[in-house]
Image: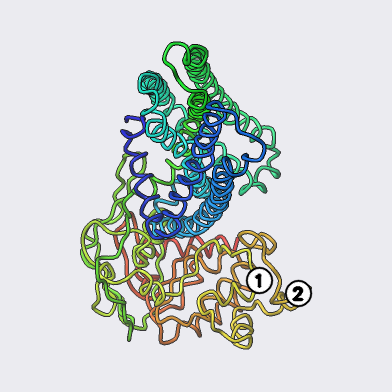
């Protein structure tokens, strides 16, 4: 993939995304551009121009003491006004730039958040959470860097070239032409060298993202690191990624140093030429002292600003490199998306139909078939258990119902409505889902329980906790329901987290209930109490219960046995035991194990 500025697809897309949010704030953007231009014009060019007029007036003929103010007064007033308005433009530039960054960063953060939240679970399963956070932060910071580079040196350089031609060209056209040729050569060399090292910045940003991902992975699994005594191993992995960052940054640094030395040599040539012109300008071409002052001041100013092109291009390189990761995510198609104008799902009864279902997932370019022409009808209000060996498709089926992934063929119907044609949010708000491993927010217990029903009263939250057998342990905590659970609920035990998740599902009071090993983390006593509450919750609701522990599903209306994505048995517990098939075999193994 091409990496050069103006040619790299990622760079173009980054600029596109940035412009789409910038254009929403036209007053701030154009205020920033205009104030920056006026600031440079007034202080860097009109000041020396007025001073050249004063020098030429002084050189023309002596001025007596009593005539100083009459003669030079207008120049002094003009200088004061120029500096007054110049400083005002400087402060206006500061305000508009700062305010623009604040407003656009809000939009960029929202844009990134929406992109991440609306991606499929397959997308998130293949990425580090820490890397995504790092890419979001870099994406926002890269915009600030680009705005600041526009403020200095991009606009000052552009303004300098224009104003030097306008103000100096009529007075010394030959010198102006020579100066412009040298500046064009300077800019050409800088740009060519910039193109050469742009890919180095993207590589450095990629290495930094890998380092962030490794750090996030180690911290997220710190319990495993410590309990297995693998601190040294994780340190070695981190050190390898860290050394790669150092290597990429060093390569980028040396390339930038070479570019800086080259352009510094060109700047030296330019200042040498202006020195010759200033020394002999009056004698050779009759250039006035005031114009000589303008020549030196303007040349020094524009050359000095061109010197900062190296720093500016380096920052642009770094900015586009940092933004590239999030840009690719923003441009990545959503694997699960709502069709345009999709209506909300409305559930009155809760009948579920899986019709001619085909589904495979792709990992590392390899397709793995899970369901092939799969059919299953679940009447409204029926309690169905899904059992089978690991990998038989039980959990996958529930995730397809929730549209955490989309099927390749067939339909999933809820009350006669195709879930693929309804909005995802409305679908998931009709299904209370309790996963095998409950993950809580770093918020209070009350907030976690009320997550599916934010408007719930404290009494409703308390009652849900009581039904889930969580009230007793919650009340023993120092802050009770206001206890903050820690990241991913790390302050609570597995069984406590699961009961909080079950209380959340109870409070949500959805017409469809999906329990994916929801009682697996509970001790026997808690399991019995929670199962009683869950069975009450299931009454009148369509319920799908995924379980390896068959005692969890034995009393349900119906049990569906899956094997490699196919239904091998279907019926109530007693019927399946009597049939002596796969379910009876599994039941015998589990109860035999319990007796042993």
Q: Which mark is residue 479?
A: 2
> Can you say which quadrant of the picture contains the C terminus?
bottom right
- Spatial CA distance of label 1 from label 2 is 9 Å
Residue 47 tag number: none
Name the residue beneath numbered marker 1: 444
Q: Position of residue 395 (x, y in %)?
A: 41, 61
Residue at coordinates 54% horizontally, 51% vertically from top-left?
85
Image vertical order of residue 419 relative to residue 538, above or below:
above
Q: Position of residue 87 (x, y in %)?
A: 58, 49
In this view, which residue lies farthest toward the right?
A: 478
- Specify the quadrant of the image occupied by residue 351: bottom left
Q: Secondary structure at mark 2?
A: loop
**In this view of the protein, which residue sits in the foreground, 324 or 124?**
324
Quarter of the image that includes the N terminus: top left
Q: Position of residue 291 (x, y in %)?
A: 48, 26
User: What crowding class fits label 1: few (fewer than 14 Cα within 10 Å), some (14-19), or many (20 or more)?
Assistant: some
Residue at position x 40%, y 19% in the image? 175
Evaluate if marks 1 and 2 touch, with contact meaning CB atoms under 8 Å apart.
Answer: yes
In what element is the residue under mark 1?
Answer: loop
């Amino acid at each position: 993939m091409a990496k050069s500025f103006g040619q790299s697809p990622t760079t173009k897309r980054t600029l596109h995304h940035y412009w789409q949010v910038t254009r929403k704030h036209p007053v701030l953007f154009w205020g920033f551009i205009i104030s920056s231009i006026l600031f440079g014009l007034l202080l860097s060019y009109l000041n020396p121009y007025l001073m050249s007029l004063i020098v030429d007036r002084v050189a023309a003929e002596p001025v007596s003491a009593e005539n100083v103010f009459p003669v030079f007064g207008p120049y002094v007033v003009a200088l004061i006004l120029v500096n007054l308005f110049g400083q005002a433009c400087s402060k206006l530039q500061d305000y508009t730039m700062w305010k623009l960054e604040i407003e656009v960063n809000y939009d960029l953060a929202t844009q990134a958040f929406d992109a991440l939240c609306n991606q499929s679970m397959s997308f998130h399963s293949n990425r580090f959470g820490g890397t995504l956070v790092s890419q979001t932060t870099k994406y926002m910071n890269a915009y600030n860097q680009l705005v600041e580079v526009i403020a200095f040196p991009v606009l000052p350089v552009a303004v300098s070239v224009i104003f030097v031609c306008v103000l100096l060209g009529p007075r010394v056209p030959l010198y102006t032409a020579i100066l412009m040729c040298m500046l064009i050569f300077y800019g050409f060399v800088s740009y060519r060298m910039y193109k050469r090292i742009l890919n180095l910045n993207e590589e450095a940003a990629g290495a930094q993202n890998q380092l962030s991902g490794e750090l996030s992975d180690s911290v997220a699994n710190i319990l495993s690191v410590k309990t297995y005594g693998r601190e040294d191993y994780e340190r070695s992995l981190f050190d390898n990624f860290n050394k790669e960052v150092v290597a990429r940054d060093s390569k980028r640094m040396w390339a930038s140093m070479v570019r800086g030395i080259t352009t510094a040599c060109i700047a030296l040539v330019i200042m040498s030429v202006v020195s010759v012109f200033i020394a002999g300008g009056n004698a050779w071409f009759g250039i006035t002292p005031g114009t000589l002052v303008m020549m030196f001041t303007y040349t020094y100013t524009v050359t000095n600003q061109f010197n900062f092109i190296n720093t500016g291009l380096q920052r642009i390189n770094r900015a586009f490199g940092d933004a590239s990761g999030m840009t690719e995510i923003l441009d990545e198609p959503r694997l699960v998306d709502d069709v345009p104008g999709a209506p909300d799902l409305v559930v009155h009864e809760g009948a579920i139909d899986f019709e001619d279902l085909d589904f495979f997932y792709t990992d590392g370019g390899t397709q793995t078939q899970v369901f092939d022409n799969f059919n299953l009808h679940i009447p409204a209000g029926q309690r169905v258990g899904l059992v089978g060996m690991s990998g038989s498709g039980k959990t996958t089926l529930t995730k397809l119902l929730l549209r955490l992934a989309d099927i390749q063929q067939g339909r999933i119907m809820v009350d006669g409505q195709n879930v693929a044609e309804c909005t995802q949010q409305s679908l998931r708000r009709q299904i209370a889902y309790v996963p095998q491993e409950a993950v809580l927010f770093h918020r209070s217990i009350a907030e976690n329980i009320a997550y599916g029903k934010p408007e719930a009263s404290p009494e409703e939250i308390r009652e849900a906790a009581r039904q889930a057998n969580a009230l007793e342990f919650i009340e023993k905590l120092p802050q009770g329901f206001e206890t903050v659970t820690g990241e991913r609920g790390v302050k609570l035990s597995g069984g406590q987290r699961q009961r909080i998740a079950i209380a959340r599902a109870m409070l949500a009071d959805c017409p469809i209930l999906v329990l994916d090993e929801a009682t697996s983390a509970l001790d026997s006593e808690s399991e019995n109490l929670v199962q009683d509450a869950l069975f009450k919750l299931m009454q009148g609701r369509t319920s799908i219960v995924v379980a390896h522990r068959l005692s969890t599903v034995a009393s349900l209306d119906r049990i569906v046995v899956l094997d490699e994505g196919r239904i091998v048995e279907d019926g109530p517990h007693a019927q399946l035991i009597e049939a002596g098939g796969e379910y009876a075999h599994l039941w015998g193994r589990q109860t035999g194990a319990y007796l042993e």
